[in-house]
Image: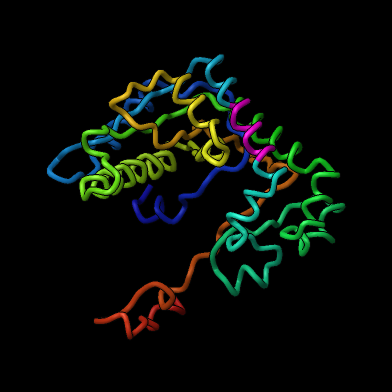
Amino acid sequence: MEFLDVVRRRKTTNGPFRPDPVSREHQRLLMEVAGRAPSQLNSQPWRFVIVEDRATIDRIASISGESMTEAMSNGTFFERYKPYFRFSADEMAEKRSGMLFDKLPALLRPFTKQVFTSRGQKLMNGLRVPQTLGEENRKLVAGSPLLLGVMLDRSEYRPGELSSFYSLFSMGAAMENVWLTTVELGMGIQFVSFPMEVPGKWQLIVDLLGVPDDLELMAVYRLGYLPAEQVRPAIDWSSRERKKPSQYVFRNSCATPETEWDGE
């Protein structure tokens, strides 16, 4: 596959993976490309833990599902991320960013405009939407053949210091290498983020993975091979739109947006 095709096809996998184990050769390749990312002074601050143990995956899946249910039941998730929620194609076309909820049960569609109100929150709780989403999330994580924990060396990751920025930048580059390589390998990848949204849940994963004091667990991803036909969850979103170049590129100074490429 040509490199630019890989970049253009990169996406987050919202649906399930095949149950097939990720081959050791592909695991090795993913870690190789991560290790080839740029880092300040060649510090290579990243560390990774590959998780295939079924009991550990199941436990992390339960933590993730419980976290999603809690964050959506108490309204913190919607309040925190409401600038990124879109409920119509027209809104998505206008904003060209965020997540379009283009797959919803018919029962919920009339109430999308109320989702950020107290009435809407009570309605969703009454319909057990948070529990439905939490269980879907648990199943997705539990059905993943491999989880990848991403850590940073605390001697490099020192919040408030310049080295912390450098290490985060390097970690992002390493994970982008991994993400792009999954496209080449016919794999999918998704950030397991909800345990970060609820106080105390992330520490459960830190303890479960035995992360030592000199490392900081920054992220957990689920990975696996993509099925021939991808099945979407009952409540799902897409994020295919991208901003026009004129919305994020300037020429010579920030006073002049680059408009020439918008139609390409």
Residue under the point 39% across and 83% down:
259
The answer to whether 252 appears left or right of 238 in the picture is left
Name which quarter of the figure residue 29 lies in. top left
Q: Is residue 208 above or below residue 154?
A: above
Secondary structure, magenta segment, majority class = helix
Which residue is at a point 39% across and 32% down the rendered structure image? 217
Residue 80 sits in quarter: bottom right
The location of residue 37, given as percent across then percent down, is 25, 42
Q: Is residue 238 above or below residue 39?
A: below
Q: Is residue 257 magenta?
A: no
Residue 24 percent across, percent down from the top left: 38, 20
Where residue 150 appears, x then y in whole percent? 38, 33
* Residue 129 against residue 32 in the figure, above or below: below
Outermost residue, left side? 41
Rendered residue at 70%/42% (across/down): 233
Q: Which residues are magenta?
A: 61-70
